[in-house]
Amino acid sequence: MKRKLIKIKDKITKKLKQLKDDKVITSYFKNNSLFVIFVLVCVINSTMLRFFTMPTAENYLSFKAIVADLAVVIILGSFSYLFTNRKRYIYLLVLATIFTAICVINSVYYTFYTSFASISMLSLTQYIGEVGDAVVENVLQLKDLLYIIPYLFFIFYYHRLVKKNKFKVYNKANRMKKFKYTILSGAVVLLLFICSLSSLEISRFVKQWNREYIVMRFGIYLYQGNDIFASLQPKISALFGYDDAKKEFNEYYQDRSETRDYTNDYTGIFEGRNVIVIHAESLQGIALNRTFNGVEVTPNLNRLIKEGLYFNNFYSQVSVGTSSDTELTYNTSLMPTQTGTAFVSYFDRTYISTPKLLKEKGYYTFSMHANNADFWNRRAMHESLGYDKFYSKETYDLEDKEIIGLGLADKEFFAQSVEKIKKICEDHDKYYGYIITLTNHTPFSDTDKYGEFPVTMKTTITNEDGTTEEIEAPYLEGTKLGNYFKSVHYADAALGEFFEEMDEAGLLENTVVVIFGDHDARLPKNDYILMNNYDPVTDSVKDTLDPTYQEYDSFDYELDRKVPLIIWTKDNEVSGEVDYTMGMYDVMPTLGNMLGFYNKYALGHDIFEIKDDNIVVFPNGNWVTDKMYYNSQKGEYKLLKDVVIDEDYISNNNQYADALLSVSNKAIVFDLFNPNSEEEAVSNSSKEN
Ligand code: GP9
Ligand code: MN
């Protein structure tokens, strides 16, 4: 080891000596040291960002990303030579400030969203503030401030140059020459980078769906530049690309063989009944039917899934809009938008939605959520979705009431909601209510408020002397996953109370209850590994060589992000376990068949018609079928069945996913469900001209 280190040291010294002897390089550095330091600072920061967000050497030492960073920094930095003396430094300082800010913002953003920031999300920063504790506990970390160090070094370096009288002053001709050579070098680097790109990389860059992929290959600066362009693009193309979008939209729906002319066992079975939908915050399938020392995490949900119809292979399809994306997809059977969120950027579009279609059938429609009405722009968007009334935080009594996590505790929220539903029942014949819970929200740290629920492992161990001993090993205590189960246990108890209160009030008699998890809880992969491979004797993860060690790869992690979907009635009209692969966009057509409404523009399907032929497309282009989970970023897949798959299967599904995501996005951006969209597009473009 020591020898190796000495060897490396020798090599470095040799290289340095070589560089020292090389007059061209040293004199270039002497004459341009501030510029060189500027370039290094920016490239180091970008590399550091990749290191902290995607910490495999392949990612942070990505050659392509480093070359891309160099190209951007050199080209933009080259303009500094057009400025005289101190102004040159000021220009570089402004650039360095912007680049450092990009790294800091993305570092913070990544911790919260596991994605990189987009300027289209700028209008959402107010919501970040609202998540309060969740942000403080999840986001602010020392690593986010490390980018300031190289930045401060740049400032320090300049002042040192000035102090030692080494800050170079160039005459005009010299400055022009330097500018030309520097920008030319930057352009050469950029050209080399572009030549190295594959067509897949270029198409991903253009689509900007998968931000990690782009940052890994294009570096953070090119990503952010592209993001600015991509974020403005919908606004611009909403004005100018209407005809192409409309054509694509028409062709897409013409080619589909969907029809409402079918009947199955579920057709019309719930026609005329009241509907209560529970949008259960972060409820993941892994919590159901799970016990700790014989005690169920979700006794109430476990009872409901036995009594009702339980879809155990169901996925949410959210992008950065998390809760709001699920609300969009559940209510409209459309996918989240490719940039920004539909709730914030496209709330003023026309949507064909479940509440609107039920209103046509005489339903009163309402939504309930004890958070601020402007969070995720719900105040505006719930109206666009067709809810007659949104009961938000201001309609709930919070005084002296229990607050957990983001707001009013679910038990109190449900109790007050039941009172509201009683009133609604008096005033309306039939109702459709969408109830959004809040307590089970990350970071699941209010453990003292969830009630007693140990996530330990009681077991009998055999000591070395052959005696046996009962122990209670800590197991998931102190982990985020463990805290999550405690939180879900509370959320489940609250749900149980809701059912009791509804029943006591006689509100369950003619009512269908739909419950689903809105998205996964963003729990660390290592916690799953610990859960599946815990050794109570050592209180740690088993050795990977242990024959009982269960591998847990990134596909298992994706598959575990499943959420439950339950359709329940008191009279057990429907029951059983359904294991067809299903997505949030399939709920509208499936429920529609049961309740007697139809949306020909739904992107999902009635699951009882499509059955095993279904495909669930995710906003990042990944997809899952009964046969495989396909990761479109990596081009890798995991088989879920013992079947042989040919290339056509993958490419056909990729095409299907691409077309679906594209048409969904265009339908929203260009307001294609609005019967007046054409006239509006024409008048908008003439305004622009
Ligand atoms: C906020 C709640 C949580 O009101 O619905 O939203 P999320 O952070 O899950 O998107
Ligand atoms: Mn949510």
Image (cartoon, rainbow, N blue to C red):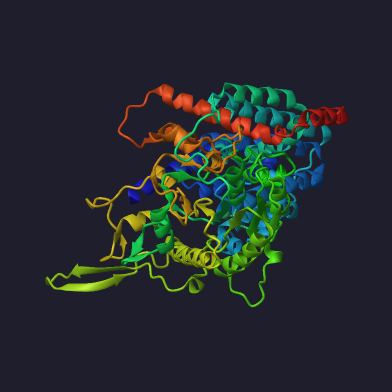
Residue 188 in percent (x, y) is at 63, 26
Is 54 above or below relative to 174?
Answer: below
Q: 294 left or right of 516?
A: left
Is 620 above or below relative to 273?
Answer: above
Q: Quadrant of ligand 1?
A: bottom right
Q: 423 left or right of 438?
A: right
Snapshot quadrant of residue 306: bottom left
Question: Which residue ends up furthest to the left in the rendered image?
Answer: 466
Asked whether 180 or 301 is in front, the reply is 301
Q: Which residue lies at the image location 66% right of the left edge and 60% below the top edge?
A: 424
Residue 150 in percent (x, y) is at 62, 52
Q: Which residue lies at the image location 55% right of the left edge and 60% below the top edge?
A: 138
User: In the rendered image, is residue 160 in sight?
Assistant: no
Residue 429 in percent (x, y) is at 65, 54
Asked whether 352 or 534 is in front, the reply is 352
Number of marks in picture: 0
Residue 463 in percent (x, y) is at 17, 70
Asked whether 262 or 60 is in front, the reply is 262
Q: 237 left or right of 504?
A: right
Quadrant placement of the C terminus: top right
User: In the rendered image, is residue 255 in sight?
Assistant: yes
Is 139 above or below relative to 199?
Answer: below
Question: Which residue ends up furthest to the bottom in the rendered image?
Answer: 400
